Each structure stands twice: as C-alpha cells, then as structure tokens.
Image (cartoon, rainbow, N blue to C red):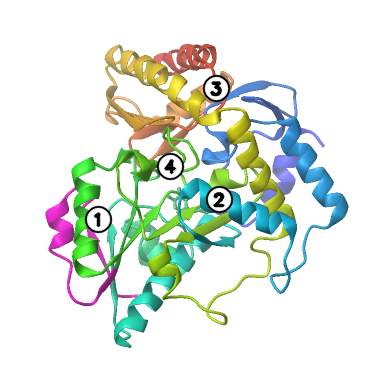
Amino acid sequence: MSMNDTIKTAEEHLLHTYNRYPIVFDHGNGVRLYDDNGKEYLDFCAGIAVYAIGYGNKRYEAALKSQIEKICHTSNYYYSKPLAEAAKALTEAAKLPKVFFTNSGAEAVEGAIKAARKYAYLKDKKTDHEIIAMQHSFHGRTFGALSVTGNDHYREPFEPMIGNVKFADFNDLDSVRALVNDRTCAIIMETVQGEGGIFPADKEFITGVRKLCDDNDILLILDEIQCGMGRCGSMYAFMQYGVQPDILTTAKAVGCGIPVGAFLLNEKTASSSLVPGDHGTTYGGNPLACAAVAEVFRIFEEDGIIDNVNKVAPYLKKRLEETVASHDCLIAERGLGLMRGIVFDTDKKKPADVVSAALSKGLVLITAGPDVIRFLPPLIISEADVDEMIDKLNASLAE
Ligand SMILES: *Cc1c(COP(=O)(O)O)cnc(C)c1O
C-alpha cells in the first residue's frame, strides 16, 4: 500500500478524533524515524515522551520476543516472573513501596483517585470528599482523569464529571489553600505540567502543597506520566524537589512502546485504601507488558540513561535560549531536563505551522497548549542531535 492508500484506508475506517499529519511511519532506529517512502526524521517527540530508550534497542526487543515466545497474558489471578520483576524495579525506582499496573496513564489516574477516596472513606465513612486539581493540568480522557483535568473545553461536552473537584492555580499556593476544607481528600497535580504548556512546579509551591497535605491528612497525588521516568533528570521529577507524593502516577516511558501505566502508593496510603475486590484490570501488569517494564529499568541502569539526560539537557536549554533570542516570534524558553518548551507570540507565528514545516524538513516536534512547541526527545539524544534539531527548527521558523 502506498502512503496515500494507507491514509485513505485509515481515514475511511477510523473514528475521526485526531487530525493526523499525512505521514505513515514504518520503523525507527535510535533517535530517528522512517516513513513508508524511506524519508528520515529526527524525532524530538518520542511518541509523546514514550520511547525514552530510543528505537530499535536490541535488548528491549530481545526481552519482548523471548516473552512472546513464552506467554503474553495470564490474568491477575496468578503470578508471573515479569510481574514480580517489574513491580520490584518500579517500586525501587520510585521509592514507593506498592504498585498497581494499568494499561494507560488515564487508568493510573483513575486508580489514584479511587485509592484517595477510599483512604478518606475509611477515616470518616463519608461519601462527599473533594479533590483539588490544577488549572491547565492534563490527566487523561476517561471520566475520573477528565474530571481533574483543568481544561474546560475537554470537560464541558461530557458533563457531568465525577463531581466534587475544585481547580486551583498551579504555582499559586494561596489559591490551593483557599480550597482546602475538611472534606478535601486529595490534591492532584503534575510535577511539571506537560500538555498545558510545560510549566515546572516552583519549589516553594510543591513544598507548600506537601505541608498543606501533611497538616490536614490530605493525600498528595503527583502525576508524572509525562515528566517522570528520567525525563527531567531524576528518575521521577519530585525527587529534585525534596518532597514525596502519597500516590504517584506513571505511564508513557514506563513501557517504552508497550502500553503500560501504574500508580504507586506510600505505606500509609497502601495500608489503608484499596483491598481485594476494590479495583482490578484484565490486562494490567500482564507478562508481556511487565517484561517490557523490567527490561526498560535494566537499560536505564546499564546505559546510564539519566546521566545522559543531565549531560545533554543543559545544552538543549542553551541552544533553545539562543533560538528564542534570535526570533521575534518567540517569547520564552522553559522546562526541566529533556522536557522543554518554547513560547510563541501567536500573533506573529503559530506553533502548529512551525510543526508542519519541521515535519517537511524531517524533524518531528509537537505542540503543548495554544502557544508552545515542546521538546520531548528520546533520552538517548546527543549534543550533535540537538544541533541538527536547532538547524531544522531555525529553518522552519524562517518559513
Ligand atoms: C499523557 C498523560 C496522561 C494520560 O495518559 P494516557 O496513557 O494517554 O491515558 C495523564 N497525565 C499526564 C501528565 C499525561 O501527560
């Protein structure tokens, strides 16, 4: 099938929920993608912060192949060795003792919300608990996750939401404090907001929220589905802030291409929330998914993936700052580690137009919010890759 035929067939049969770029990707290698015509692309999107270890990692592929030859699925009524290995690796990496595996980020958020409500319910047997979430946040498209997503356009057509959710302003501690009352069971936020436009939490803000939670026995849920897994320069971004969540959500890069998510709980929350019968999943934590997770953590360790983030991120930041300084249409650069964004003056140029121009020049980028292009490369990129990206970005901005 030619690229055009593939696109035509897909459009004929897929529910139209995405405006896709007219590209059919076939395979990848390292930080590069190849379309059906053999055209090469430098990838600064990584399937939206998924493919942290890059494409075509031989050990990752071998681990998956060998698991496929044994068994892909058994159900959660039984144990499997990959499940035990993945649970050990993820809990040790996140420094939180208990994990529940899901198939996606949104499901991880669903589980986190259920755990938080159950924790509060066990304390006072009431059923009117509230959650505080942040404006401009993104937590996923299922009802619970959507209910705590701070974007009216995403929520409104699907009202009513789960209810009892209030929105505070990210990085404004007073706005959070004003919403706390004796029914508040959880505060949920991304450590670095992703879809909303790449906003890292301020240290004072996240420390203040942690204290607010401690003082009122409210659970802090950190959503690190995008910013976690080494992307910001530590295994999870919260580790740089000197705070710990009660519940952590993770997904995207945890499986590096195999759909996996998880929520993790600290001892206090794990010992007083979900019990057998409260929550479940058919596929979550199956042997194939967990073989991927276990191998991803081995690769992170052996290949020094996070060391590479800390080596290359300052260079990416510097080159992006130079780019912002040399283009009228750009206002600012921000981010943490290899999760960065450049902010557009949208009267002068639209981020989406620059993304399209970049694609035609063989560079994969992605927008965030209305006025940002974000950079989420595989975590194995080099400074030479950054230079090549900047050249292509400059050319795309000049169009
Ligand atoms: C992508 C994302 C989600 C949703 O994950 P899905 O796997 O798409 O359901 C939730 N939270 C954050 C911060 C994300 O970036």
Contact check, label 2 and label 3, Cβ < 8 Å? no
Precedes in sequence: disc 4 or disc 3 = 4
Q: Is 115 above or below relative to 375?
A: below
- Residue 172 falls left or right of residue 233: left
Contact check, label 2 and label 4, Cβ < 8 Å? no
Name the secondary structure under disc 2: helix
Give the residue at mark 3. 381
Query: Residue 90, how many percent across, how many down?
Result: 55, 50
Q: Which of marks 1 and 3 is in front?
A: 1
- Residue 108 falls left or right of residue 53: left
Q: Give the range drawn in magenta.
A: 163-185
Precedes in sequence: disc 1 or disc 4 = 1
Give the residue at mark 4. 227
Q: Is 239 above or below relative to 100?
A: above
Precedes in sequence: disc 2 or disc 4 = 2
CA separation in Å, label 2 and label 1? 23 Å
- Quarter of the view holding residue 398: top left
Packing grade of label 1 (10 A; few <14, some 14-19, many >=20) is some
Q: Which of marks 2 and 3 is in front?
A: 2
Precedes in sequence: disc 2 or disc 3 = 2
Residue at position x 75%, y 31% from top? 58
Indicate the amino acid at tag 1.
Answer: Arg
Give the residue at mark 1. 210
- Quarter of the view holding residue 213: bottom left
Observer-nearest of 378 and 205 = 205
